[in-house]
Image (cartoon, rainbow, N blue to C red):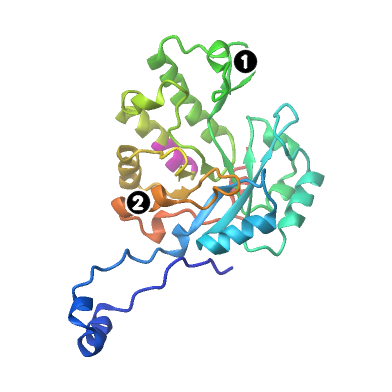
């Protein structure tokens, strides 16, 4: 499937030089070059929700912004409360049918740790990818707690934030070790009151634990323009280790496809197509490679 290209590719420097020498004015000869053309693998937002729109409206934005979208719908048991939630193969089939023939990637955002029980392996294999995050954690009573909610601090012991952080990092590792998915979304996100001290909590050893797990289990790490995360120290460690990256806005209409932070990080890291996540072919998707 052809991906949209957001910019024209420049001619080679030799050809450009010849053309400029013959036709350009002096002022044109001193013009500053524009940014380099982005690879197709970097012109994808893999974390797009349709909560506030339709697929047709999303596709209009995709064309306008020159960004291909990966559509994800929340998926898991009915205990997860979202405007739309896929909880069985029949609902998954209807979702896939709605996207059939559209120039998008088809994914789900898996919820909690029991989402696999809702679907057959054959059903999940129809997806291009599965995305999840580590933002829902076990509370004091073992039940799921969404860390971004107002009452999360009452349900999860965060009295000593450094101790909480060690548990949070281990939770990231457990999610990757026990669930067959392709992209870790919202990587290095932190609850309210901690994000402004990101460097205090995401120490190099903690970063390395998450990166090592991503490498071990074949998980791509999302770069999020919405949160402006992960920060450059994490991304440098991850790139040096050989991790794969994806771009994902977690956007609802009209905020999907706004990837400026991702493009800037890609520039600073000098990311190549080989550093970027691409959906695996049939037979090699995470839900097929990792039968847990």
Q: Secondary structure at mark 2?
A: helix
Q: Is residue 114 left or right of residue 269?
A: right
In percent of width and height, residue 134 lies at 53, 31
User: On residue 18, which mark appears?
Assistant: none
Region in magenta? 211-217
Q: Secondary structure at mark 1?
A: loop
Q: Residue at x 59, y 53 (%)?
A: 70
- In the rendered view, tell whether residue 2 sits above or below residue 262: below
In percent of width and height, residue 76 lies at 70, 35
- Quarter occupied by the N terminus: bottom right
Q: Note whether residue 27 is visible.
A: yes
Disc 1 crowd rating (10 Å Cα; few below 14, some 14-19, many 20+) is few
Q: Residue at x 32, y 79 (%)?
A: 11
Disc 2 crowd rating (10 Å Cα; few below 14, some 14-19, many 20+) is few
- Alpha carbon distance from label 1 to label 2: 40 Å
Dot 1 or dot 2: first in sequence order is 1
């Amino acid at each position: 499937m052809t991906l949209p290209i957001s910019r024209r590719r420049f001619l080679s420097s030799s050809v450009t030089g010849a053309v400029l020498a013959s036709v350009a004015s002096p002022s044109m000869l001193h013009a500053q070059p524009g940014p380099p053309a982005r690879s197709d693998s970097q012109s994808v937002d893999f974390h797009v929700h349709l909560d506030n729109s339709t697929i047709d409206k999303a596709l209009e934005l995709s064309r306008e912004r020159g960004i291909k979208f990966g559509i994800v719908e929340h998926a898991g048991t009915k205990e997860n409360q979202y405007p739309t939630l896929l909880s069985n193969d029949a609902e998954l089939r209807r979702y896939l049918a709605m996207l059939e023939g559209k120039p998008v990637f088809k994914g789900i955002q898996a919820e909690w740790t029991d989402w696999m029980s809702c679907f057959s392996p054959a059903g999940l294999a129809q997806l291009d990818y599965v995305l999840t995050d580590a933002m829902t954690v076990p509370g004091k009573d073992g039940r799921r707690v969404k860390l971004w909610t107002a009452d999360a601090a009452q349900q999860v012991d965060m009295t000593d934030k450094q101790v909480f952080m060690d548990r949070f990092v281990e939770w990231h590792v457990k999610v990757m070790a026990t669930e067959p998915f392709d992209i870790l979304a919202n990587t290095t996100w932190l609850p309210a009151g901690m994000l402004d001290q990101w460097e205090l909590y995401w120490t190099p050893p903690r970063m390395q634990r998450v990166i090592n797990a991503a490498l071990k289990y074949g998980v791509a790490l999302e770069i999020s323009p919405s949160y402006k995360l992960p920060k450059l120290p994490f991304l440098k460690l991850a790139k040096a280790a050989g991790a794969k990256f994806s771009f994902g806005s977690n956007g609802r209409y009209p905020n999907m496809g706004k990837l400026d932070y991702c493009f800037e990080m890609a520039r600073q890291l000098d990311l190549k197509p080989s550093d970027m996540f691409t959906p695996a072919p049939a037979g090699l998707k995470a839900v097929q490679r990792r039968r847990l």
